[in-house]
Amino acid sequence: MIPSTPRINTLLLSAGHMLNDFYCNFLPILLPIIMPKLGLSLTLSGLLVMVMSITSNLLQPVFGYFMDRHNWHKVLVPVLPFGAACICTIGFVESKALLFLLIALTGLSVSLFHPLGSTLVEKSVAAKNLAGSMSYYIAGGNFGFAFAPIALVAFTETQPLTALPWLILPSLLLAWIFSISKLSTISTRPTKSTAIPKPPKLTALLANRAVIKLNLSMGLRCWTHTSVATFLPLLLIHAGYSSLNSGLLLTLFLVGCTAGGLVGGWTGGRYLSHKRVIIASLLLGTLPTYYFFTHAGTNLLALIALFFSGFFLLAPQPSSIVWAHSLMPGNAGMASGMMVGLSFGLGSIGTALTAWMADFIGLFTALLLTTIPMLLSALVAFITPLKSNGK
């Protein structure tokens, strides 16, 4: 049995988050291979991304709501192998309908893991250490997300898609480790407080204007992030770059995301308020994002801009989760589901719109326009109150 300490629990959950996001980021790399095979247009590819986002993101608050009221901890063991098996059998797909089904099921595993993992982190550590632990948890997911493109490109250049099931093995190993850990026994956060807030009713949560504004702000941020993460490889391949180089540049962007999540998590609540971290990151992030899509390439300045675009796009995420927890006491699962899931679900709707525009104005121009939602996101965060009064 693996001992249960805040550090070990955070490490295990961060590893789970890493693998979970590793598998869910296969789609952007597989799209250029799948599109000609199944005859997918850019618009249909955008719809595929939206389906993935609906099942992987929009359902997170729903699962989180019930996880706050019932013990779903045992789901932690099978959820990773389930998602891995769905995405890794995509090489055998011969129809669009089956493709959409497998992508939807892959997303379902993400919706189950994210609120559960965030809730277990929240329950594993003292309140004063939550921001730091959450930044490690977020960084784990970002690292897996960042590592997926280069790993998958290397794999697909030497192996056929039908060999993808070999990549299920890491999820089976971590599932076994989870099964011998004490994560499933965690029920309360180890603080001096003697009372845990009772989860509010759903109607009260849906009427919480501060939460709604924060979610809208993060949804606008995710529009930019999801669009870049999804279509950057396709953009570069169309511009004449190899699949390996396009995968490397996507990895660079996502490594920037990982670094930004860590720095943003440690900065929020220590040196700046969570609100200021979010606003400052979004405003600063528009500059490198705009620069890259007007100077896209592999020159040094473009690479630096791409890195810092990812850095500032993900820096707000840990702060948004901790801020949402404070706005929704006793509802950590739903709060995390909103900030990690619903926000990206809203962003995926924007990504589908970006894909639709790309069919008419070109992918470069469509991605350049995604700097506008970043500015709107900063504005909405600015008008969001730090504390909730239910209005």
Image (cartoon, helix red, strand yellow):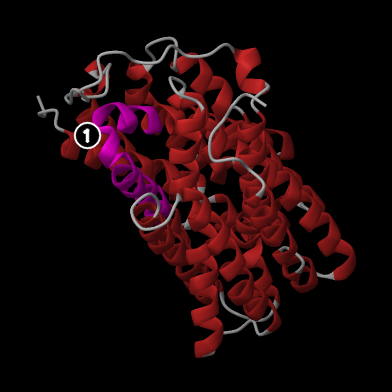
Q: Give the range drawn in magenta.
A: 118-144
Q: Nearer the viewer, residue 94 or 344?
A: 344
Left or right: 72, with 2 as reference point: right
Left or right: 324, with 80 as reference point: right
Local crowd size for mark 1, using a 10 Å CA cut-off: few (<14), some (14–19), many (≥20) = many
Give x and y (percent) for residue 342. 61, 35
Q: Is mark 1 on a helix, strand or loop?
A: helix
- Say whether residue 207 is visible: yes
Question: Which image quarter holds the N terminus?
Answer: top left
Give x and y (percent) for residue 78. 36, 24
Magenta-colored stretch includes residue 206: no
Give x and y (percent) for residue 280. 54, 63
| Above/below status of 241 relative to 128 | below
The extreme right residue here reads 360
Tell me what residue is drawn at x 84 percent, y 55 percent. 356
- Say whether residue 336 is visible: no
Magenta-colored stretch includes residue 129: yes
Q: Nearer the viewer, residue 244 or 63?
A: 63
User: Residue 272, located in which quarter of the rendered image?
Assistant: bottom left
| Above/below status of 370 relative to 68 | below
Q: Which of 125 and 117 is in front in this view?
A: 125
Q: How many labels does the image show?
A: 1
Left or right: 141, with 128 as reference point: right
Question: Which image quarter holds the C terminus?
Answer: top right
Tell me what residue is drawn at x 60 percent, y 21 percent. 205
Tell me what residue is drawn at x 53 percent, y 35 percent. 387
| Above/below status of 55 relative to 223 | above
User: Residue 364, located in which quarter of the rendered image?
Assistant: bottom right
Give x and y (percent) for residue 171. 33, 38
Q: Name the residue under label 1.
A: 9
| Magenta segment, prevailing SS (helix, strand or loop) | helix
Under mark 1, the amino acid is: Asn
